[in-house]
Image (cartoon, rainbow, N blue to C red):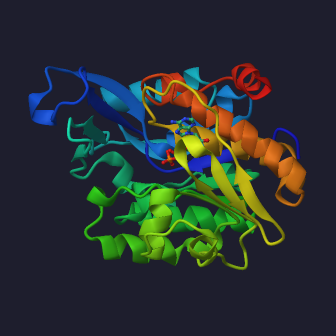
């Protein structure tokens, strides 16, 4: 189906990032606001590439929530699945890459509006119209948004959507590493397309090896495509019939935030346009080259959403 709808489910929030890099949050002289949230980034990535996208999630009925809804709209993402919570406020995160190379996070989730999404208030009509239903976020961590997440997946599946999952592990938000692994694996065998980063592969398998054996230990019968992203090295792909690597692009990276979401958005755009990319290796490799280029460009600018490319920009890099 050409130009089918990609529905992305989960959270949208604002990251506050120090105005100077390499400092701890306490030392930051000030902060810039960087709208994000992996599922929202994916929806915008799709729309920027010319695809049809909708975001399903809950925001606070506050200044930040309306700002975020405005960003989705300006970028051409359907807002039919956005809800505003009358009580709780929009989720906020303070994120810094310290001088010692460690990422430091602080979250406002007290609870935040996204956590309060209930199954009853989902726009089921919108979810049923999805050609691809993408999820993978912090909405799996707590109730009631966990139940909303599970219900949305079920409804999309029943309606015939392809399910796409990116676990987007954010360990500091989980009560424990064990809880994260258990919950992520509890929905593992539902998705037909799964993208993990090399670090997530290590975490989920509990092995420090990133090889075919460890990737394939995560294989399940419903899966059509498993991707392991390797940062600047590109990605490794696995299907029932073939596997391989597609090299990444050399670019001047300044901020890798959103690279994975950009990669997923590009991949889903291509899958929606032609499902046979999941079965034909030559086509899949072309698509992954495009997705790698999309991810690479996203690292060349600060922030996630401002760095997501348009199709002509991606094609320029692909064609060299
Ligand atoms: P995640 O953001 O999920 O951790 P990665 O960092 O592996 O995922 O990035 C996703 C994709 O973006 C990679 O597969 C690659 O194609 C591209 N990418 C990421 N970082 C770079 C980089 N430094 N240079 C070039 N491409 C990159």
Residue at 70%, 29% in the rendered image:
49
| Residue 94 % position (x, y) | 24, 37
The C terminus, quarter of image: top right
Res. 218 image quadrant: bottom right
Left or right of 221? Residue 35 is left
User: From the viewer's perspective, is residue 105 above or below residue 28?
Assistant: below
User: From the viewer's perspective, is residue 4 above or below residue 254?
Assistant: below
| Residue 294 % position (x, y) | 65, 33
| Residue 227 % position (x, y) | 65, 58
User: From the viewer's perspective, is residue 231 above or below residue 307?
Assistant: below
> Which residue is nearer to you in this view: 52 or 223?
223
Residue at 70%, 59% in the rendered image:
237
> Which residue is nearer to you in this view: 190 or 299?
299
State ligand 1's quadrant.
top right
| Residue 258 % position (x, y) | 49, 37
Residue at 32%, 25% in the rendered image:
33
Residue 161 in sight here: no
Left or right of 128? Residue 114 is left
Residue 117 in sight here: yes
- Picture mark count: 0
Residue at 63%, 25% in the rendered image:
309
Left or right of 130? Residue 200 is left
């Amino acid at each position: 189906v050409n130009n089918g709808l990609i529905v992305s489910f989960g959270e949208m929030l604002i990251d506050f990032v120090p105005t100077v890099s390499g400092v701890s949050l306490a030392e930051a002289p000030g902060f810039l606001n960087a709208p994000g949230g992996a599922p929202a980034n994916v929806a915008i990535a799709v729309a920027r590439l010319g695809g049809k996208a909708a975001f399903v999630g809950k925001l606070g009925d506050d200044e930040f929530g309306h700002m975020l809804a405005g960003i989705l709209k300006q970028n051409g993402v359907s807002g039919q699945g956005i809800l505003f919570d009358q009580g709780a406020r929009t989720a906020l995160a303070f994120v810094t890459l310290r001088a010692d190379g460690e990422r430091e996070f602080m979250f406002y989730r007290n609870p935040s509006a996204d956590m309060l999404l209930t199954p009853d208030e989902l726009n089921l009509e919108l979810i049923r119209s999805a050609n691809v239903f993408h999820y993978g976020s912090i909405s799996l961590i707590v109730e009631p948004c966990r139940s909303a997440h599970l219900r949305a997946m079920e409804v999309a599946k029943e309606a015939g959507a392809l399910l796409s999952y990116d676990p987007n592990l954010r360990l500091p938000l989980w009560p424990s590493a064990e809880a994260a692994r258990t919950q992520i694996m509890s929905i593992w065998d539902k998705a037909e397309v799964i993208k993990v980063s090399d670090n997530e592969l290590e975490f989920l398998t509990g092995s420090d090896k990133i090889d075919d054996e460890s990737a394939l230990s995560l294989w399940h019968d419903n899966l059509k495509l498993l991707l392991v992203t390797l940062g600047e090295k590109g990605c490794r792909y696995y299907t029932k019939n073939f596997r391989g690597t597609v090299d990444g692009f050399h670019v001047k990276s300044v901020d890798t935030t959103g690279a994975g979401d950009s990669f997923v958005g590009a991949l889903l755009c291509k899958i929606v346009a032609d499902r046979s990319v999941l079965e034909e290796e030559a086509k899949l490799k072309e698509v992954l080259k495009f997705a790698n280029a999309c991810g690479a460009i996203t690292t060349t600018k600060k922030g996630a959403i401002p760095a997501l490319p348009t199709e002509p920009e991606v094609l320029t890099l692909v064609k060299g």
